[in-house]
Image (cartoon, rainbow, N blue to C red):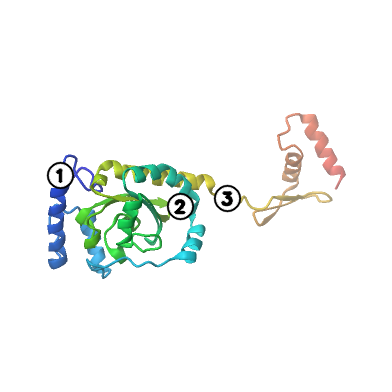
């Protein structure tokens, strides 16, 4: 496999590969043995799923509904980029009979949108807003695994740990806070076998990067701190307060700082500097 994060090699038969993966999945759930051609990223995710106590027949729990969901979404940082996500992914999802989904860093789905018939099918497995799709809740899946490993990932067919999710294919990429680097959540595209293509993984990665760029533009500028304060009148040595510190300047430095405060653009004329110095001295 040239790219371990892509589910299918170019030219591979999706139906045959799905059959091989189903056999490998059954072997793993029965004996704990990972067979080829299961990718390392999937094998590691299956093992994390087992350690978390996830069974192959669980269903995602819906943790947030109605007003609680609406309030949580409104306060979440990714709400600020949903217009952009819809512009980039909405038409692709609708035309391809796919779903676009956005999760938080805990794997909870915040938005699930797209083709109506596909949404109805997804509803039956609780792939709905407010449901928790973390690896620790429902095992290997693209949004849950993407936030778990912190990078884009594609999950195809029986690579999903839970059996009733195995008819689906999905690709997801984490979205990071541009200031801190922490994972805020993930953007995901979910549908059928047609998504088992490297382009779908590159697509969600590009959307995630665009969302991060938008968040960076919307971020408030960092505080510059309090303005510096200079006290020089009536004193031989000026007091400069800046950044919470108070510094007594020497007489020469006091004159220089006073000159700069009167001429922040700089003072190139010697007579001007001398005049300002005399004026300052006369006020002491």
Quadrant assignment, res 145: bottom left
Is residue 238 in view from this perspective?
A: no
Q: Earlier in the sequence, mark 2 or mark 1?
A: 1
Say whether marks 2 and 3 touch (CB < 8 Å): no
Tell me where residue 201 appears, x and y as whole percent.
30, 45
Q: Secondary structure at mark 1?
A: loop
Depth check, mark 3 against mark 1: the one in front is: 1
Tell me where residue 42 appears, x and y as whole percent.
22, 56
- Is 78 on the left-hand or right-hand side of 97? right
Near-viewer residue (58 or 120)? 120
Q: Residues within 10 Å of mark 2 (few under 14, many from 20)?
A: some
Q: Secondary structure at mark 3?
A: loop
| Residue shown at 30% from the left, 57% from the top | 121
Quadrant assignment, res 21: bottom left
Residue assigned mark 2: 177
Residue 13, disc: 1
Near-viewer residue (155 or 68)? 68
Which quarter of the figure is the N terminus placed in? top left
Farthest-out residue, bottom: 53
Is residue 108 in view from this perspective?
A: yes
Q: Residues within 10 Å of mark 1 (few under 14, many from 20)?
A: few
């Amino acid at each position: 496999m040239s790219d371990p994060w892509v589910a299918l090699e170019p030219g591979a038969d999706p139906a045959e590969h799905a059959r091989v993966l189903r056999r490998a999945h059954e072997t793993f759930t029965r004996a704990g043995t990972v067979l080829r051609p299961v990718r390392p990223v999937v094998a590691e995710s299956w093992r994390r799923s087992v350690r978390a106590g996830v069974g192959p027949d669980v269903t995602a729990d819906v943790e947030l509904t109605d007003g609680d969901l609406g309030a949580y979404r409104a306060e979440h940082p990714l709400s600020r980029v949903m217009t952009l996500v819809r512009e980039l992914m909405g038409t692709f999802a609708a035309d391809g009979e796919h779903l676009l989904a956005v999760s938080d860093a805990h794997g909870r789905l915040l938005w699930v949108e797209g083709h109506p018939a596909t949404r109805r099918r997804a509803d039956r497995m609780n792939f709905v807003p407010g449901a928790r799709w973390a690896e620790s809740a429902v095992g290997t899946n693209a949004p849950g695994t993407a936030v778990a490993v912190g990078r884009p990932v594609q999950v195809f067919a029986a690579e999903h740990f839970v059996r009733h999710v195995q008819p689906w294919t999905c690709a997801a990429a984490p979205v990071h806070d541009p200031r801190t680097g922490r994972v805020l959540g993930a953007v995901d595209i979910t549908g059928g076998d047609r998504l088992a293509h490297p382009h779908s993984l590159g697509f969600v990665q590009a959307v995630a990067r665009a969302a991060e760029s938008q968040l960076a533009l919307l971020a408030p500028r960092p505080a510059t701190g309090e303005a510096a304060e200079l006290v020089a009148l009536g004193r031989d040595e000026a007091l400069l307060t800046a950044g919470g510190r108070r510094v007594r300047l020497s007489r020469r430095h006091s004159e220089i700082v006073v000159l700069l405060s009167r001429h922040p653009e700089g003072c190139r004329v010697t007579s001007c500097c001398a005049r300002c110095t005399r004026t300052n001295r006369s006020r002491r």
